[in-house]
Image (tube, helix red, strand yellow):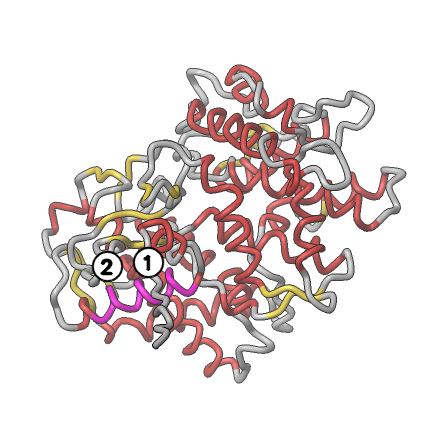
Amino acid sequence: MKVTPVLSFVKTDADSAYSLLNAKAVRSRAQRMLALGLDDKLPHFRINLGCLDDAIERVRTITLKNYPSLDVPFHSRWRHFVIDGKDRWGAIAAKTSRRDRAERARAEFDLAIVSVFLDAGAGPQWRYRDPTGAAIGRSEGLALASLAMFERGDFSAMPAQPLRADAEALRQLPVERLGAGFQVSRDNPLVGVEGRAALLRNLGNVVAAAPEVFAINDKPRPGGLFDHLAGVAKGGAIAAPAILTELLCRLGPIWPSRLSLGGVPLGDCWKHPSIVTGDATSGLVPLHKLSQWLAYSLIEPLQRSGIDVTDIDGLTGLAEYRNGGLFVDTGVLAFRDPADAQREHEVSSPLVVEWRALTVALLDRVADGVRRRLGTDATSMPLAKILEGGTWAAGRRLARERRADASPPVKVISDGTVF
Protein backbone atom coordinates (compact mmCIF):
# COMPACT_ATOMS: atom_id res chain seq x y z
CA MET A 1 0.00 0.00 0.00
CA LYS A 2 1.41 3.34 -1.04
CA VAL A 3 1.35 5.95 1.71
CA THR A 4 0.97 9.54 0.61
CA PRO A 5 3.18 11.74 2.75
CA VAL A 6 1.44 14.42 4.75
CA LEU A 7 2.88 17.83 3.94
CA SER A 8 3.16 20.09 6.93
CA PHE A 9 4.12 23.72 7.19
CA VAL A 10 6.35 24.71 10.03
CA LYS A 11 6.25 28.43 10.70
CA THR A 12 9.77 29.83 10.98
CA ASP A 13 10.86 32.89 12.93
CA ALA A 14 11.20 34.71 9.61
CA ASP A 15 7.56 33.89 8.79
CA SER A 16 6.59 35.23 12.20
CA ALA A 17 8.57 38.41 11.54
CA TYR A 18 6.81 39.07 8.23
CA SER A 19 3.47 38.68 10.02
CA LEU A 20 4.32 41.91 11.89
CA LEU A 21 5.20 43.92 8.78
CA ASN A 22 1.71 45.12 7.95
CA ALA A 23 -0.97 47.51 9.13
CA LYS A 24 -3.28 44.73 10.29
CA ALA A 25 -0.69 43.62 12.84
CA VAL A 26 -0.29 47.20 14.10
CA ARG A 27 -4.03 47.58 14.63
CA SER A 28 -4.47 44.12 16.15
CA ARG A 29 -1.74 44.51 18.77
CA ALA A 30 -2.83 48.06 19.55
CA GLN A 31 -6.38 46.87 20.18
CA ARG A 32 -5.01 44.12 22.40
CA MET A 33 -3.13 46.76 24.40
CA LEU A 34 -6.30 48.83 24.73
CA ALA A 35 -8.29 45.81 25.92
CA LEU A 36 -5.70 45.22 28.65
CA GLY A 37 -5.88 48.87 29.60
CA LEU A 38 -9.65 48.83 29.84
CA ASP A 39 -9.27 45.91 32.25
CA ASP A 40 -6.79 48.03 34.24
CA LYS A 41 -3.98 45.56 33.55
CA LEU A 42 -1.32 47.84 32.08
CA PRO A 43 1.74 48.85 34.12
CA HIS A 44 2.08 52.50 33.11
CA PHE A 45 -1.25 54.05 32.07
CA ARG A 46 -4.83 54.08 33.26
CA ILE A 47 -7.59 54.68 30.72
CA ASN A 48 -10.56 56.97 31.36
CA LEU A 49 -12.98 56.65 28.45
CA GLY A 50 -15.17 59.24 30.15
CA CYS A 51 -12.74 61.85 28.83
CA LEU A 52 -12.89 60.56 25.26
CA ASP A 53 -15.85 62.81 24.41
CA ASP A 54 -13.67 65.85 25.13
CA ALA A 55 -11.00 64.58 22.73
CA ILE A 56 -13.61 63.86 20.05
CA GLU A 57 -15.18 67.29 20.42
CA ARG A 58 -11.80 69.03 20.19
CA VAL A 59 -11.04 67.16 16.98
CA ARG A 60 -14.47 67.95 15.54
CA THR A 61 -14.13 71.64 16.41
CA ILE A 62 -10.67 72.11 14.95
CA THR A 63 -11.59 70.16 11.84
CA LEU A 64 -14.54 72.47 11.15
CA LYS A 65 -12.39 75.51 11.84
CA ASN A 66 -9.65 74.41 9.45
CA TYR A 67 -11.95 72.90 6.82
CA PRO A 68 -15.47 74.41 7.09
CA SER A 69 -16.62 72.62 3.93
CA LEU A 70 -15.17 69.32 5.21
CA ASP A 71 -13.02 69.15 2.07
CA VAL A 72 -10.17 67.71 4.14
CA PRO A 73 -7.03 66.49 2.36
CA PHE A 74 -5.13 63.39 3.38
CA HIS A 75 -2.66 63.61 6.25
CA SER A 76 0.61 63.48 4.33
CA ARG A 77 3.96 65.18 3.81
CA TRP A 78 2.50 67.25 0.97
CA ARG A 79 0.56 69.39 3.45
CA HIS A 80 3.82 70.67 4.93
CA PHE A 81 4.98 72.01 1.57
CA VAL A 82 2.01 74.39 1.55
CA ILE A 83 2.84 77.57 3.45
CA ASP A 84 0.42 80.52 3.69
CA GLY A 85 -1.69 78.92 0.99
CA LYS A 86 1.21 78.58 -1.45
CA ASP A 87 2.12 75.10 -2.66
CA ARG A 88 5.89 75.29 -2.91
CA TRP A 89 6.41 71.83 -4.37
CA GLY A 90 3.64 72.44 -6.89
CA ALA A 91 5.37 75.63 -7.99
CA ILE A 92 8.72 73.86 -8.35
CA ALA A 93 7.19 70.97 -10.28
CA ALA A 94 5.36 73.37 -12.61
CA LYS A 95 8.64 75.02 -13.63
CA THR A 96 10.19 71.79 -14.83
CA SER A 97 9.94 70.46 -18.36
CA ARG A 98 8.80 67.07 -17.07
CA ARG A 99 5.38 66.30 -18.49
CA ASP A 100 5.63 62.53 -18.15
CA ARG A 101 3.30 61.52 -15.31
CA ALA A 102 5.48 58.56 -14.38
CA GLU A 103 8.61 60.70 -14.16
CA ARG A 104 6.85 63.26 -11.98
CA ALA A 105 5.70 60.40 -9.75
CA ARG A 106 9.29 59.14 -9.45
CA ALA A 107 10.45 62.62 -8.43
CA GLU A 108 7.62 62.89 -5.90
CA PHE A 109 8.47 59.45 -4.50
CA ASP A 110 12.11 60.58 -4.17
CA LEU A 111 11.08 63.74 -2.33
CA ALA A 112 8.47 62.08 -0.11
CA ILE A 113 10.71 59.19 0.92
CA VAL A 114 13.70 61.37 1.78
CA SER A 115 11.62 64.08 3.46
CA VAL A 116 9.56 61.67 5.57
CA PHE A 117 12.65 59.81 6.75
CA LEU A 118 14.01 63.18 7.89
CA ASP A 119 10.78 64.01 9.71
CA ALA A 120 11.39 62.63 13.20
CA GLY A 121 10.94 65.19 15.99
CA ALA A 122 13.23 68.21 15.63
CA GLY A 123 13.17 69.28 19.27
CA PRO A 124 11.73 72.52 20.64
CA GLN A 125 14.72 74.78 19.88
CA TRP A 126 15.37 74.10 16.19
CA ARG A 127 14.08 76.45 13.49
CA TYR A 128 14.53 76.61 9.72
CA ARG A 129 14.93 80.16 8.44
CA ASP A 130 13.03 80.31 5.19
CA PRO A 131 14.13 82.62 2.31
CA THR A 132 11.10 84.76 3.19
CA GLY A 133 12.68 85.38 6.58
CA ALA A 134 10.22 83.26 8.54
CA ALA A 135 11.63 80.96 11.22
CA ILE A 136 9.70 77.69 11.06
CA GLY A 137 10.12 74.76 13.46
CA ARG A 138 9.03 71.18 13.87
CA SER A 139 7.55 69.17 10.97
CA GLU A 140 6.87 72.17 8.74
CA GLY A 141 10.42 73.43 9.12
CA LEU A 142 11.86 69.97 8.48
CA ALA A 143 9.72 69.70 5.36
CA LEU A 144 10.85 73.04 3.96
CA ALA A 145 14.51 72.33 4.71
CA SER A 146 14.33 68.98 2.92
CA LEU A 147 12.45 70.54 0.00
CA ALA A 148 15.14 73.24 -0.38
CA MET A 149 17.86 70.56 -0.39
CA PHE A 150 15.90 68.55 -2.95
CA GLU A 151 15.43 71.59 -5.20
CA ARG A 152 19.18 72.35 -5.04
CA GLY A 153 20.01 68.79 -6.06
CA ASP A 154 21.68 67.87 -2.76
CA PHE A 155 20.37 64.31 -3.07
CA SER A 156 20.97 63.97 -6.83
CA ALA A 157 23.96 62.31 -8.52
CA MET A 158 23.13 64.11 -11.76
CA PRO A 159 23.85 67.89 -11.67
CA ALA A 160 21.69 68.51 -14.73
CA GLN A 161 18.73 66.83 -12.98
CA PRO A 162 18.49 68.23 -9.44
CA LEU A 163 14.92 67.08 -8.70
CA ARG A 164 15.76 63.52 -7.85
CA ALA A 165 17.40 61.42 -5.15
CA ASP A 166 19.94 58.82 -6.23
CA ALA A 167 21.25 55.88 -4.26
CA GLU A 168 24.78 56.92 -5.22
CA ALA A 169 24.38 60.38 -3.66
CA LEU A 170 22.46 59.21 -0.60
CA ARG A 171 24.91 56.51 0.40
CA GLN A 172 27.73 59.09 0.50
CA LEU A 173 25.77 61.87 2.18
CA PRO A 174 27.99 63.57 4.79
CA VAL A 175 26.40 64.67 8.02
CA GLU A 176 27.90 68.12 7.43
CA ARG A 177 25.84 68.58 4.25
CA LEU A 178 22.66 67.61 6.03
CA GLY A 179 23.54 69.89 8.94
CA ALA A 180 24.14 72.80 6.58
CA GLY A 181 20.89 72.16 4.74
CA PHE A 182 19.01 72.15 8.02
CA GLN A 183 20.93 75.19 9.29
CA VAL A 184 22.16 73.33 12.36
CA SER A 185 24.39 75.29 14.70
CA ARG A 186 25.19 75.55 18.39
CA ASP A 187 22.35 78.05 18.71
CA ASN A 188 20.03 76.05 16.45
CA PRO A 189 20.40 72.40 17.51
CA LEU A 190 18.51 69.67 15.68
CA VAL A 191 17.78 66.45 17.58
CA GLY A 192 19.49 63.41 16.04
CA VAL A 193 21.13 65.00 13.00
CA GLU A 194 23.74 62.22 12.90
CA GLY A 195 21.00 59.59 13.06
CA ARG A 196 19.13 61.26 10.21
CA ALA A 197 22.21 61.33 7.99
CA ALA A 198 22.93 57.68 8.78
CA LEU A 199 19.34 56.79 7.92
CA LEU A 200 19.66 58.36 4.46
CA ARG A 201 22.99 56.61 3.88
CA ASN A 202 21.33 53.33 4.83
CA LEU A 203 18.51 54.16 2.42
CA GLY A 204 21.04 54.65 -0.37
CA ASN A 205 22.70 51.32 0.37
CA VAL A 206 19.40 49.42 0.42
CA VAL A 207 18.21 51.02 -2.81
CA ALA A 208 21.51 50.32 -4.57
CA ALA A 209 21.37 46.68 -3.50
CA ALA A 210 17.93 46.07 -5.05
CA PRO A 211 17.98 47.28 -8.69
CA GLU A 212 15.16 44.88 -9.52
CA VAL A 213 12.90 47.08 -7.36
CA PHE A 214 14.45 50.54 -7.51
CA ALA A 215 16.05 50.66 -10.98
CA ILE A 216 13.41 49.28 -13.32
CA ASN A 217 13.44 52.36 -15.58
CA ASP A 218 16.34 54.44 -14.26
CA LYS A 219 19.46 54.43 -12.13
CA PRO A 220 18.82 53.14 -8.57
CA ARG A 221 16.74 55.76 -6.75
CA PRO A 222 14.05 55.63 -4.06
CA GLY A 223 11.60 56.93 -6.66
CA GLY A 224 12.11 53.72 -8.59
CA LEU A 225 9.68 52.20 -6.11
CA PHE A 226 6.93 53.88 -8.12
CA ASP A 227 7.62 51.62 -11.10
CA HIS A 228 7.62 48.58 -8.83
CA LEU A 229 4.26 49.52 -7.28
CA ALA A 230 2.81 50.30 -10.70
CA GLY A 231 3.89 46.82 -11.75
CA VAL A 232 2.17 45.07 -8.85
CA ALA A 233 -1.02 47.16 -9.12
CA LYS A 234 -3.91 45.05 -10.39
CA GLY A 235 -6.35 46.60 -12.81
CA GLY A 236 -4.76 49.98 -12.23
CA ALA A 237 -5.37 49.85 -8.48
CA ILE A 238 -3.36 49.10 -5.35
CA ALA A 239 -4.51 48.86 -1.72
CA ALA A 240 -2.93 51.28 0.76
CA PRO A 241 -1.93 48.46 3.17
CA ALA A 242 -0.05 46.81 0.29
CA ILE A 243 1.98 50.01 -0.14
CA LEU A 244 2.95 49.85 3.53
CA THR A 245 3.96 46.20 3.34
CA GLU A 246 6.15 46.93 0.32
CA LEU A 247 7.80 49.79 2.20
CA LEU A 248 8.39 47.68 5.29
CA CYS A 249 9.80 44.72 3.38
CA ARG A 250 11.89 46.73 0.90
CA LEU A 251 13.21 49.43 3.23
CA GLY A 252 13.22 47.60 6.57
CA PRO A 253 17.01 47.20 6.70
CA ILE A 254 17.58 50.97 6.85
CA TRP A 255 16.54 51.25 10.50
CA PRO A 256 19.44 51.32 12.99
CA SER A 257 19.89 49.03 15.98
CA ARG A 258 16.34 47.76 16.05
CA LEU A 259 14.83 44.38 16.77
CA SER A 260 14.97 41.56 14.24
CA LEU A 261 13.40 38.11 14.16
CA GLY A 262 14.68 35.25 12.05
CA GLY A 263 17.09 37.66 10.41
CA VAL A 264 14.24 39.99 9.35
CA PRO A 265 14.48 43.61 10.59
CA LEU A 266 11.26 44.61 12.36
CA GLY A 267 11.59 48.39 12.00
CA ASP A 268 9.44 50.46 14.35
CA CYS A 269 8.56 47.46 16.53
CA TRP A 270 9.28 47.19 20.24
CA LYS A 271 8.88 44.96 23.28
CA HIS A 272 6.15 45.17 25.89
CA PRO A 273 5.71 42.48 28.56
CA SER A 274 1.90 42.65 28.55
CA ILE A 275 1.51 41.46 24.95
CA VAL A 276 1.75 37.68 25.26
CA THR A 277 1.17 35.33 22.34
CA GLY A 278 1.88 31.68 21.70
CA ASP A 279 4.54 32.18 19.06
CA ALA A 280 7.85 33.88 18.37
CA THR A 281 6.17 37.30 18.19
CA SER A 282 5.23 37.24 21.87
CA GLY A 283 5.96 40.58 23.53
CA LEU A 284 6.39 42.42 20.22
CA VAL A 285 4.39 45.55 19.35
CA PRO A 286 4.67 46.83 15.75
CA LEU A 287 3.89 50.53 15.22
CA HIS A 288 5.61 51.55 11.95
CA LYS A 289 4.92 55.25 12.41
CA LEU A 290 7.27 56.78 9.82
CA SER A 291 6.57 54.01 7.30
CA GLN A 292 2.81 54.56 7.60
CA TRP A 293 3.32 58.33 7.36
CA LEU A 294 5.23 57.60 4.16
CA ALA A 295 2.53 55.26 2.86
CA TYR A 296 -0.03 58.04 3.35
CA SER A 297 2.34 60.42 1.54
CA LEU A 298 2.68 58.16 -1.50
CA ILE A 299 -1.07 57.98 -2.12
CA GLU A 300 -1.33 61.32 -3.92
CA PRO A 301 1.60 60.77 -6.32
CA LEU A 302 0.10 57.40 -7.23
CA GLN A 303 -3.30 58.96 -7.79
CA ARG A 304 -1.82 61.75 -9.93
CA SER A 305 -0.11 59.12 -12.05
CA GLY A 306 -3.46 57.44 -12.74
CA ILE A 307 -3.26 54.58 -10.22
CA ASP A 308 -6.24 54.16 -7.91
CA VAL A 309 -5.43 53.63 -4.21
CA THR A 310 -8.04 51.59 -2.33
CA ASP A 311 -8.64 50.59 1.32
CA ILE A 312 -7.03 53.73 2.70
CA ASP A 313 -8.63 53.01 6.08
CA GLY A 314 -6.66 49.77 6.13
CA LEU A 315 -3.76 51.86 7.41
CA THR A 316 -3.82 52.91 11.07
CA GLY A 317 -3.46 56.11 13.00
CA LEU A 318 0.08 57.29 13.59
CA ALA A 319 1.76 56.49 16.90
CA GLU A 320 3.45 59.84 17.33
CA TYR A 321 3.60 62.47 20.03
CA ARG A 322 0.91 64.89 18.80
CA ASN A 323 -1.73 62.19 18.47
CA GLY A 324 -0.54 60.56 21.70
CA GLY A 325 -0.38 63.91 23.46
CA LEU A 326 -4.04 64.51 22.65
CA PHE A 327 -5.03 61.58 24.85
CA VAL A 328 -2.75 62.43 27.76
CA ASP A 329 -3.67 66.12 27.76
CA THR A 330 -7.42 65.38 27.66
CA GLY A 331 -7.11 62.85 30.50
CA VAL A 332 -8.03 59.79 28.44
CA LEU A 333 -4.64 58.40 29.43
CA ALA A 334 -3.19 59.02 32.89
CA PHE A 335 0.20 58.00 34.27
CA ARG A 336 -0.05 55.46 37.04
CA ASP A 337 3.02 57.08 38.55
CA PRO A 338 2.62 60.88 38.22
CA ALA A 339 6.40 61.24 38.45
CA ASP A 340 6.66 59.61 35.01
CA ALA A 341 5.39 62.87 33.53
CA GLN A 342 8.66 64.51 34.59
CA ARG A 343 11.04 61.68 33.71
CA GLU A 344 12.64 61.19 30.30
CA HIS A 345 11.90 57.86 28.63
CA GLU A 346 13.69 55.90 25.93
CA VAL A 347 11.71 55.15 22.79
CA SER A 348 12.15 51.45 23.54
CA SER A 349 10.80 51.72 27.10
CA PRO A 350 7.58 49.82 27.88
CA LEU A 351 5.99 53.10 28.95
CA VAL A 352 6.49 54.70 25.53
CA VAL A 353 5.53 51.53 23.68
CA GLU A 354 2.35 51.30 25.77
CA TRP A 355 1.50 54.96 25.13
CA ARG A 356 2.05 54.68 21.38
CA ALA A 357 0.02 51.48 21.01
CA LEU A 358 -2.86 52.91 23.01
CA THR A 359 -2.73 55.97 20.77
CA VAL A 360 -3.25 53.85 17.65
CA ALA A 361 -6.26 52.05 19.15
CA LEU A 362 -7.84 55.21 20.56
CA LEU A 363 -7.52 57.03 17.23
CA ASP A 364 -9.94 54.52 15.72
CA ARG A 365 -12.48 55.38 18.43
CA VAL A 366 -11.98 59.10 17.93
CA ALA A 367 -12.46 58.69 14.17
CA ASP A 368 -15.78 56.92 14.71
CA GLY A 369 -16.94 59.60 17.13
CA VAL A 370 -15.92 62.51 14.90
CA ARG A 371 -17.69 60.98 11.90
CA ARG A 372 -20.91 60.59 13.89
CA ARG A 373 -20.82 64.22 15.03
CA LEU A 374 -20.04 65.49 11.55
CA GLY A 375 -22.64 63.28 9.90
CA THR A 376 -20.07 61.63 7.63
CA ASP A 377 -18.80 58.10 7.11
CA ALA A 378 -15.51 56.31 6.56
CA THR A 379 -15.83 56.61 2.79
CA SER A 380 -16.03 60.40 2.76
CA MET A 381 -13.90 60.89 5.89
CA PRO A 382 -11.29 58.12 6.08
CA LEU A 383 -8.83 58.02 8.95
CA ALA A 384 -6.24 59.85 6.81
CA LYS A 385 -8.55 62.88 6.84
CA ILE A 386 -9.40 62.57 10.53
CA LEU A 387 -5.69 62.73 11.28
CA GLU A 388 -5.24 65.82 9.13
CA GLY A 389 -8.42 67.58 10.24
CA GLY A 390 -7.91 66.59 13.01
CA THR A 391 -6.21 64.73 15.77
CA TRP A 392 -2.70 65.97 14.99
CA ALA A 393 -3.77 69.62 15.03
CA ALA A 394 -5.78 69.16 18.23
CA GLY A 395 -2.81 67.51 19.92
CA ARG A 396 -0.53 70.36 18.91
CA ARG A 397 -2.98 73.03 20.09
CA LEU A 398 -3.35 71.34 23.48
CA ALA A 399 0.43 71.15 23.85
CA ARG A 400 0.68 74.89 23.20
CA GLU A 401 -2.04 75.59 25.74
CA ARG A 402 -0.51 73.38 28.44
CA ARG A 403 3.23 73.96 28.05
CA ALA A 404 5.19 77.07 27.08
CA ASP A 405 7.45 75.16 24.69
CA ALA A 406 4.55 73.13 23.19
CA SER A 407 6.38 69.93 24.10
CA PRO A 408 4.50 66.63 24.34
CA PRO A 409 3.24 65.48 27.75
CA VAL A 410 5.49 62.41 27.61
CA LYS A 411 9.19 63.21 27.55
CA VAL A 412 10.86 60.94 25.00
CA ILE A 413 14.56 60.66 24.31
CA SER A 414 14.74 60.69 20.50
CA ASP A 415 17.55 59.70 18.14
CA GLY A 416 15.89 61.39 15.17
CA THR A 417 14.61 58.17 13.59
CA VAL A 418 11.27 57.45 15.27
CA PHE A 419 9.04 60.51 15.74
Which residue is more in the foreground, 137 or 316? 316
User: Residue 16 placed where, x, y %?
Assistant: 34, 55
- Give percent across and percent down for residue 39: 14, 72
Q: Is residue 321 left or right of residue 291?
A: left
Q: Dot 1, how many residues are within 10 Å of its Cα: few (below 14), some (14-19), or many (20+)?
A: few
| Residue drawn 63% across the image and 52% down it | 298
Q: Name the mark on residue 149.
A: none
What type is the residue that disc 1 sits on? Answer: Lys
Label 2 element class: loop
Q: Is residue 240 above or below residue 211?
A: below
- Per the rendered image, the range of residues in magenta is 24-35
Q: Is 171 placed left or right of 317 in the picture?
A: right
Asked whether 355 or 340 is in front, the reply is: 355
On residue 279, the disc is 2
Which residue is found at the position 78% from the left and 61% from the top? 306
Q: Is residue 29 magenta?
A: yes
Q: Magenta stretch containing residue 114, yes or no?
A: no
- Vertical comparison of 367 with 164: above or below: below
Indicate which disc residue 11 carries: 1
Q: Residue at x 18, y 68 (%)?
A: 36
Please state, as top left, top right, bottom left or bottom right, where the C terminus lies in the image: top left
Predominant SS along the magenta part: helix
Which quarter shows the N terminus? bottom left
